[in-house]
Image: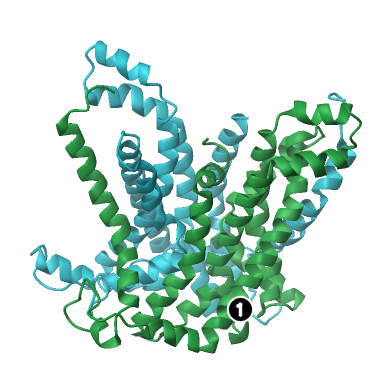
Amino acid sequence: MENNSLGKQIVVYTTLAFMLLCALFPLYWMLNTSFKSTGEIYRLTPTFWPEAFSWDAYAKLLNEKGFMINIRNSLVVSLTVSLFSIAVSMLAAYAISKLKFRGRSLISKGILYAYLMPRAVLFIPLYMLVSAIGISNSIYGLMLIYPTITIPYATWMLISYFKSIPVEIEEAAMIDGCSRARTLRSIIFPLAAPGLAATFIFAFTLCWSEYLYALVIVTKTADKTITLGLSEMIVGDVFAWGPLMGGSIIASIPVIIMYLFTSKYMVSGMTVGGVK
Amino acid sequence: MKTKLDNKLAYLLMSPVLIYLLAVMVLPFGWALYLSFTDKVVGMPARFTGLTNYIELMRDSIFWKAVWNTIVFTGVAVFFKTVFGMIMALVLNEKIVCRNLFRVLLFLPWTIPTIVSVFTWQWIYSDVGGVLNHILLQLKLIGQPMGWLAQPDLAMISVILVNVWRGIPFMGIAILAGLQTISRDMYEAAMLDGAGAIKRFWFITLPSVKEVAILAGVMTTIWTLNDFEIIWLLTRGGPSNATQVLSTLSYTIGFLNMSLGKAIAIAILTMPPLIMLINYVTKRSLSRE
């Protein structure tokens, strides 16, 4: 566009500055609070920069056994569920994207339905399933039901990755005498590796951030995940803002790092392939 | 090789996913559907009661209040997310310095766990040491500290604000993807014809991103309609049900009052509009292939 006039530039950069302020201030405030001493936090006039940097909030979190257990539980559940989901989803996604079979459109529609079905509708049926099996109140319950979030999502994302791999590559390999299993193992999956990695990361962050299912299923302290651990730092009306903000930072760091590595894949995946 | 059907192989490869989804999603949902016609209470066997749960809900003024609140919450939040998402996309589509850095930064609110954003905002809203009251008092925009989450009408605005803050980046990036498909030639041709900035936006930009924006908007609507965490953690549906939406009401009835049957009935009642929205997304996404 030619008319990059000064007036337009001013409008664009002012809007950008305002949006950055709105988007980042709460995040800054979380970080800022986590480094304040308790006395400074509860002062009537908030300070916009910690007077003296204090690691008290973090020290308190790391010394408290409970929070470390929460982190470990979240790691175990998120890793197990994401690995399992990717493993089964990539097979299904391959079939849906590359094979011709009866009922294909019905099944891809079903997967999309499962992806979009909200947790607020499913949480009671899933709670009842888990308690009927007798693994409620433990991370095994979460391991059983979190794939309802990650499998439809991963399958849907991987379908579009596999579709982007040209059929010709596969056909060439098979003409050269590769069996289908070998084609899959040495051509398709390696080519889809970046997609598999990105999908794994998003599946991990979905589990890591999950709250509602954990809330209804786990009540035993030893099995609580990080989101439950955070919400339990609030006792009645007493908010320990220092540790709560420190804990929030700790909970955010893994997902932010993972996001930075894969940001370019994120949106096309989330918008179910409709946006590319 | 291309015309032959691979039925056996396909279903073999899909079997883990299909079996899992049938066993853990479809069957429990069907069972829950049945339980919504019973008086199921936690720890007690269910007794068939027909439409009792549904009739009781229809007569319950809190249910209708939750329906209305859900509509207001969703409608207002989706509207603002779309408008600000559009602005974000338009700005990021300009030639600006460090565009990728700004894109990543503006996307951050959407990446952090919902529960983290909720606690951060709760602290910002706090009436003791909260920074929002402090800033607004300094700017002389308010005369006295406000109870952002304590006053019924303000509480709704406060929960919507958090949802909008989190949701703008998704709309923004989706619309941006649409904007980047518009060719510069079209704008240049329009400019030669003497079309001003507003006309160009209205006749070129909007039609080009319409489809992407509607798809992303419908997905956002599905998520917003069922938002539980933001409202539950900020207000528990209060004060005096001012922010009670269907998801929080369903949780309250199911897990605090232990009436699972009735709680499921609420979830079932949200299904018809939900199915319409999901149908729309599936039709649009699948037809693009």
Residue A265, x across and y down, in percent: 54, 45
| Residue A39, placed above or below residue B133 | below
Name the side, left or right, on which B86 lies relative to A46: right
> Chain in cyan?
B
Q: Quadrant of residue A1?
A: top left
Please tell me which residue is depicted at 66% across the width and 65% down the height of the picture: A79
Q: Colour of chain A?
A: green
Q: Label 1: few (<14), some or many (≥20) within 10 Å?
A: many
Name the side, left or right, on which A50 lies relative to A207: left
Camera-side residue of B100 and B204: B100
Residue B173, x across and y down, in percent: 42, 42
Name the side, left or right, on which A12 lies relative to B57: left
The quadrant the N terminus of chain B occupies is: top right
The quadrant the C terminus of chain B occupies is: top right
Q: Which residue is mark 1?
A: A218
Please tell me which residue is depicted at 31% across the width and 34% down the height of the picture: B94
Please tell me which residue is depicted at 52% across the width and 47% down the height of the picture: A266
Residue B3, x across and y down, in percent: 85, 23
Mark 1: which amino acid? Val
Q: Residue under mark 1: which chain is it in?
A: A
| Residue situated furthest top in the rendering | B193
Residue B52, x across and y down, in percent: 58, 67
